[in-house]
Structures are given as C-alpha cells and as structure tokens.
Image (tube, grey):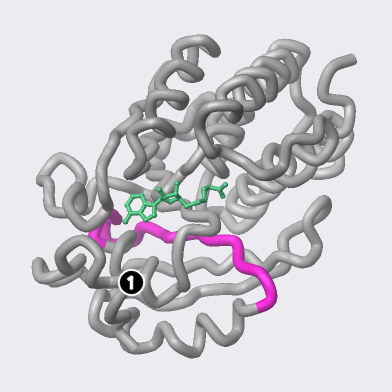
Amino acid sequence: MPMEVLARAAEGLGLPLSAQQLQQFEEYYHELIAANRHVNLTSITDYQEVQRRHFGESLAVGAALYRAGVLKPGETARVLDLGAGAGFPGLPMRIAHPALRLTILEATRKKTAFLERLVTRLSLEGVTVITGRAEIVAHEPAHREGYDLALARAVAPLAVLVELALPFLKVGGCLATPKGSRASQEMAEADRALALCGGRIVSAEPLPSPTPTLTLVLVEKLAPTPAAYPRRPGAPTKRPLH
Ligand code: SAH
C-alpha cells in the first residue's frame, strides 16, 4: 500500500483516507521530489519523513481545526494558505477535506509554478494558486476580508503573521498557525499587533500525534483591520508591531 505511514497517522487522527486520496498523496510525493531537483521546495525528502512531517503534520492541523469547531465536517469554508511553499499545510488538508475552497498564496514564482502543475495533475477543484506577497494581495478587494480561515506554517513570527493574515479574514474568521518551542514567546510579543489588527488569541493547544511537539495557535478576528495594514512589502518583518 502506498503512503502507509500517512494512512496510519490519518487513522490515528480519526480521518481514514480512501485509496484515491492515498494515491493523490503518493503522486504529490513524487512530483515534490522531482521538482525539488530544480526548485528549493523542501529539505525533507525521505519517503517516510515527508509522510510524517509534511503530510501528517498538515492533516493534524486540519484535525485540530475540526475538533475545535473552526471547520465543520462537509461544510465549505474559504481557506487561505499564506506562504505555502510546496503547499503545506493547505494542500494536504484540501486532499483530505474536499469541501474546503483553498487559495494558496506564495511569493516565489517557481514554487507557484510547481503548485499549479500539481493541482492540475491531482485534478483538485476549488483550489486557486496566487503568486504574490501578502502585503500587496491583502489590499485587493477580492481578497480583503474574504476568508474564513488563514493557515501559515513556518512563514513568520506570530506578530508578523497577525499583520499579514488578519486583513484577509472576515470578522469572526480565524488564523491557525503551528508553532514550535518559541510559541509562548511569540504570543507574548504579538499583543500589540493583535490590538492594532483586531485579533485575539483564542487557544494554543498541542497538536495531536504525529507532531506532539507543536502548538497550534488560534487567533480570532474580532474587528475589521485598519486599511493601513499590512504595511508595504518587507515592513511587517523589518519592523514588527511589537
Ligand atoms: N508553509 C510552507 C513553506 C514555509 S517557507 C511549509 O511549512 O513548508 C515560507 C514561505 O513563505 C516561502 O516559500 C516564502 O516565499 C513565503 N512567504 C514569506 N513571506 C511571504 C509573504 N509576505 N507573502 C507571500 N509569501 C511569503
């Protein structure tokens, strides 16, 4: 059976994957490894490690969001994956949960070229790939306050992410970001960004197996974000709203 490690991890999350879904992950793996020869997509290339760290971890994020009631089984939701790189965590979540309408935002053209090919190859509907920076795209009317959920893994510290992601969310929407050992410190440093951008941390829970060392930080958007945010490209990172 292909993707055996992932299949077991998904079952552990209460999310059995069909043979067709496992086949999609198998193709995802091969496309990733082939493209990684020319484009810097991932330092993890081992078959089992990709299943655990990229696919499994992404599905764990999804499982936690369904458990928290942020996502509801079978219901559509507009989801943005900000700084998706090779598609994590949004694309594995979309493969597992076809009701999600996913927009992938990634600044690097070579990475979005890979993602576009992959989405076509896997026949995934309801997935849009955008090449661009969050600082620009967040000011476009089609995207501002247009999403129920924003995801971001390994993109920026929480204070920076709050400025980049909250403008995309509808009031009542959520930002979900898995964080490592610096989670508490990043949360403490995000107070001002949260106050300025209209957000509040609602929870910070350990992610379920297979990634017990990660904390999923959930931020709810309580009020519209002022039009000044996000600031121009680079500014959120260079001068975080601390
Ligand atoms: N989320 C993926 C990739 C992490 S690397 C994963 O977990 O594997 C971070 C990615 O975010 C890079 O590909 C980078 O190009 C993208 N990125 C960083 N800042 C961005 C911004 N302001 N707008 C859009 N993409 C951004």
The quarter of the picture where residue 180 lies is bottom right
Q: Residue at x 36, y 49 (%)?
A: 148
The reply to whether the residue tagged 1 has its Cβ within 8 angstroms of ligand 1 is yes
Q: Residue at x 28, y 81 (%)?
A: 239
**Position of 213 relative to 120 (above/below):** below
Q: Residue at x 40, y 21 (%)?
A: 116
Give the magenta range: 167-181
**Does the image show residue 139?**
yes
On the image, the x and y values in percent for residue 174 come to: 41, 59
On the image, the x and y values in percent for residue 30 come to: 68, 19
On the image, the x and y values in percent for residue 53 come to: 74, 46
**Position of 101 relative to 190 (above/below):** above
Q: Amino acid at mark 1?
A: Thr
**Position of 126 relative to 218 (above/below):** above
* Category of crowding for the residue at label 1, using alpha-carbon neighbours closer than 10 angstroms: few (below 14), some (14–19), many (at least 20): some
Residue of label 1: 237
**Position of 75 relative to 83 (above/below):** above
Q: Quadrant of the C terminus?
A: bottom left
| 67 displayed left or right of 197 | right
Foreground residue, 116 or 222?
Answer: 116
